[in-house]
Amino acid sequence: MSMHTLYNLVTGPLAWAAFAIFIGGMLAKFIYLTYLAKKKDPTVFAYLSTKHVIRSWFMWSVPFVAKNWRLRPLFTVVTFAFHISLLAAPIFLMAHVMMWSEGVLGISFWTLPDQVADWMTVIVIVCCVYFAVRRMIVPEAKYVTDIKDFLMLILVALPFITGFLAYHQIGDYKVMIILHIVSGEVWLAMIPFTWLGHMILGPMVRGYMGSEFGAVRHVKDW
Amino acid sequence: MTVDTQEKKIIEDPGIDQGAAKLTPEKIAQVINTTLGTENLARLYAYTKTCVHCGLCSDACHYFLSHDRDPKYSPVGKIKNTLWPMIKNKGKVSVEFMKEAARIAHTECNLCRRCVQYCPFGIDTAFMISTVRRIVHKLALTPQYIQDTAHSHAATMNQMWVKEDEWIDALMWQEDEARDEFPDFRIPLDKEGSDVYYSVIGPEPKFRTQLIYQAAAIFHEAGVDFTMPSGTGWDNSDMCMFTGDFEMMGRLKRDHYESAMKLKVNKIVMGECGHAYRSVYDMGNRWLGWREMPVPIIHSIQYFYELLMAGKIKVASTIDKLATFHDPCNTVRGMGLHEMGRAVAKAFVPNMVEMYPNREHNYCCAAGGGVINCGPPHKMTRVHGNKIKAEQLKATGAELIVAPCHNCHGGLEDIVHHYKLDMEIKFLGDIIYEHMVKTKAVEE
Ligand code: HEM
Ligand code: HEM
Ligand code: SF4
Ligand code: SF4
């Protein structure tokens, strides 16, 4: 197989598959949990309160509001920098947006200056290293971490590492870009099947707990 | 402060040990799989799938903090040692494993829900530990002492094997006593159409009748139109909730509410107890499928607050000791009553200092969640497991702890004693009764 056909494969069918698994998987998770709650856990919906769902999301999305964020400033800065960069860099990257606009969607949207995206990429990688080291040295994290959790961190970091190397033309660009695309696709496809699914389940749990604490127990949940 | 660094030794409990002797791996797998496969599925699924194993919940737990940050006492550590293997192995776990799981779930977690406030996702570890207890219950592995109280609930509808005549006798005895102080005093039984139905926990008629006297005296002085039932329903406590015997919990709560409904009262006021509040306001009603309560239920903290604000009880004298306020988990993380509690306490004890952390972030007493009810074999588990509370109390320099909850009293007494803190512990009712204006009492 030539490099060219390989490139076509990973940017064509494989990319479609990755996005389909990611979006379909997340939707399925959302629908499944909603169905389970309706069917097997009716008190969940009985006490859901929009106001308190939003309140809880907001309170936990702003750094240093929640008590636990205030207790651990370094971790808080790291996790916020990590999550913001993790979402913003790939979505608003010029190189990615161009593929959307020239390809399937035909739309173009706001992009980040390359320099900023590059820094965000570095932030994600450094934060993953921080998380990994923390899992090795902080006893309460180490105790509940197993090999899978480390693999997950590597998986999360890989598209950023390869993207960085490709952008800076370190190593063989053609190989690197293919590695990048493949790792990005694995990244997307794995989210629904691992605890990375917290991307969708996290806000659902948070919203439910916000309702329980806010609407039923009349007390803060942060 | 002395540091208790002792190896975790296995505590013998006839309930767990004798129950385990009758178990087979097949039975264990069958019970685990039917429970995890059918009950409260949505929450269990969401919590176990969402957890990223970060350990951020650890700092919430007094057991973890009291054992020098030993991770096996962290909330997620306890889930790792109970629920995770059950799920991972599809119920195929050993009898030894189940014994340990029963011990962890019943004596190393107070279901205080503090960790829920610390997990960035709001994962409810207390709920998962409750689920473990439910499995333990179905396998008949529940610790002996608490199982005895659950049996009492089933046989008598109260926690302490109190017979009907003993209950009525306890009330009439208190009425008699109180008539020396308040000539017109009554504890009206089964008075239909009263404004307030007053319910208490099983141990009150058994060991702490003085509390019934005091509450009734406060109501009498405030001119409250109240009644107490002569039959079952008077006990709002609930050990079945804590053992995972939810069927029995439902029966108890229905009896409680129906007894109030039969008397056509406007509201139920309940004594100073935290777990009972969780049972009537949060857990039991859900099991019965009642979103709202059929009769409004009000905790004493709130009721005393209302009486005080309305000027129905007035302050005659104050206590000049330095005091601190202990927030019971079930009235703060269960109902946000922290400011009302403080307002009542401050009115009578102006000299108050805070513990840190406080209010909805306060540390549990380590007696709650049925842990104290697991009895003497497990006493030191909770005393050693709450060294942090002793440090927190000591740092206030207070001489008096105001704690509006029965379990908290039990737990704090043991902690005060073990760590030699020399602090007195009082209910709000103790303080109000002693220091309110008594217009209806005989002149001394
Ligand atoms: C699925 C198909 C994907 C394709 C076709 C793709 C393609 C590209 C291309 C062409 C570049 C530019 C390299 C250069 O400037 O020469 C790039 C960079 C980058 N990609 Fe992707 N990508 C994909 C998925 C992902 C995913 C899923 C992520 C993140 C999770 C990601 C993160 C990045 C980042 C952070 C950079 C920039 C690195 C830097 O500037 O330092 N990509 N990608
Ligand atoms: C957009 C919705 C998301 C939300 C609300 C969210 C929220 C959180 C929260 C609350 C935590 C817990 C502890 C911490 O703050 O580190 C966490 C951890 C983590 N998240 Fe996310 N997340 C989201 C998306 C993602 C995505 C898409 C990924 C990567 C695929 C990701 C990767 C991680 C990782 C690796 C950790 C664990 C860090 C560690 O090792 O301790 N998150 N996330
Ligand atoms: S004792 Fe409280 S903080 Fe500790 S695990 Fe149980 S519910 Fe969580
Ligand atoms: S329960 Fe929450 S805080 Fe604790 S390890 Fe899991 S995700 Fe982290």
Image: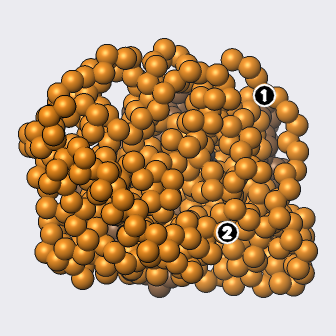
Chain colours: A brown, B orange
Q: Is residue B245 above or below residue B413?
A: below
The amino acid type, in three-letter code, at marker 1 is Asp
The amino acid type found where label 2 is placed reads Gln
Q: Residue at x 73, y 50 (%)?
A: B376
Q: Residue at x 52, y 62 (%)?
A: A201
Secondary structure, mark 2, is helix
Label 1 vs label 2, nearer the camera: 2
| In this view, B394 is above or below B382 | above
**Residues at marks 1 and 2 touching, judged by CB atoms closer than 8 Å:** no
Q: Please state the chain letter of the residue tagged with numbered disc 2 in the rendered image.
A: B
The residue that label 1 is drawn on is B4
Q: Is residue B55 left or right of residue B258?
A: right
Q: Nearer the viewer, residue B427 or B56?
A: B427
Depth check, front residue: B19 or A209: B19
Q: CA distance from mark 1 to mark 2?
A: 29 Å
Residue B441 appears in view: yes
User: Residue A56: x percent and y percent?
Assistant: 36, 49
Residue positioned 26% across, 71% down in the render? B189
B129 to the left or right of A49: right
- Which class describes the residues within 10 Å of circle 2: few (<14), some (14-19), or many (20+)? many
Disc 2 C-beta below 8 A from ligand 3: no
What residue would you read off at disc 2? B147
Instruction: Confirm whether circles 1 and 2 share one chain.
Output: yes
- Identify the image quadrant of residue B24: bottom right
Q: Is residue A6 visible?
A: no
**Secondary structure of residue under mark 1:** loop
